[in-house]
Structures are given as structure tokens and as C-alpha cells.
Image: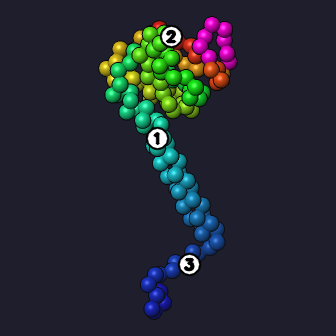
Amino acid sequence: MQKGTAFMTVKPKSKKTAAVVIAFGLLLLGAGACFLTSLWKTRDQREDYRQISSLTYDSVFLSMYPVDTFEEEDFAYFRAMTLFKASYCIPEFSVVEQYMERIMASGNQVTTAGTASPQNRPGQPSGPHGTVSFRHL
């Protein structure tokens, strides 16, 4: 260490060692970023989780497609359903499982589950994003 400097510099024994240390550091940084990203919930998903535990409903509508054009009031009027509609566009099946676990723990007796599909089918309510189908549980 030189006199007058606040930091000690360490010189690696070889450039190969320095490259390995840098690569390992970048790998750890990337793994940490991936881990934190997996823990992060979007605002829509957090709001959905809050509503799951605080609202009263007998039907749920979860989708891996946008559901912005479908309104809960339409289902109440046309199908006599008290509906929870997820505002979060679910990216993968593991997230659907998380939603279903929270719904089962909510205390609501859910009798119907709905999904959206991108194809329009005759006889089913549909919007610009496709068809809605419900199944009794």
C-alpha cells in the first residue's frame, strides 16, 4: 500500500485469475437480480391479491390474455354471478396456482371459474380479445 492512499490495491497474480474473479462477480450479480425479480409482484397482481381476500364473490375469472374489455357488471347482469376478475394478465400456470391458493384461502365459496381464450366461439360471451368460458366447480 502506498503512503497517502485510502485504499489498498490488490494485484492479481495473473490476468486469468482476474477474469475468473470478474466473471464470478458478474454471475453472482445476475443471479441476485433474477432472484429479486422473481420475488417482485406487479401492482396489478398485488391489488388482485388484496381484492381476493377482501371481496365477496362466487365466481372467479382468471386469464393469460388481456381481459380489459370484460366487466364484472356484465357477468352479474347476464349470468347472475358475483365475480372476481383478475386485472393482472397471468404470464404462466404457476401464477394461476398462486391465485387459486389465495382464492381457496379467502373464505369465499367459489362455484364457477372462468377463463378467456383468444378464439371466438359461438354461444359464448366474447369481446375483442376472444371468448369467455365458465365451468362449474
Location of mark 2 (residue)? 78
Location of mark 1 (residue)? 43
Q: Position of residue 20 (x, y in %)?
A: 60, 63
Residue 41 vertical position relative to residue 86 in the rendered view, above or below: below
Label 1: state its secondary structure. helix
Q: Is residue 55 left or right of residue 13?
A: left
**Residue at left 57%, top 59%?**
26
Residue 129 vertical position relative to residue 25 in the rendered view, above or below: above
Q: Is residue 39 left or right of residue 108?
A: right
Q: Is residue 88 visible?
A: yes
- Of 103 and 13, which appears nearest the observer? 103
- Of 14 and 121, which appears nearest the observer? 121
Dot placed on the residue nearer the N-terminal end, 2 or 3? 3
What range of the chain is rendered magenta? Answer: 119-126
Nearer the observer, disc 2 or disc 3? 2
Q: Is residue 101 left or right of residue 24?
A: left
Q: Mark 1: which amino acid? A: Arg
Label 2: state its secondary structure. helix
Q: Mark 3: which amino acid? A: Lys
**Residue at left 38%, top 18%?**
57
Dot placed on the residue nearer the N-terminal end, 3 or 1? 3
- Give the alpha-carbon distance from disc 3 to disc 1, as whole Å: 46 Å
What secondary structure characterizes most of the magenta part?
Answer: loop
Location of mark 3 (residue)? 11
**Residue at left 56%, top 29%?**
68
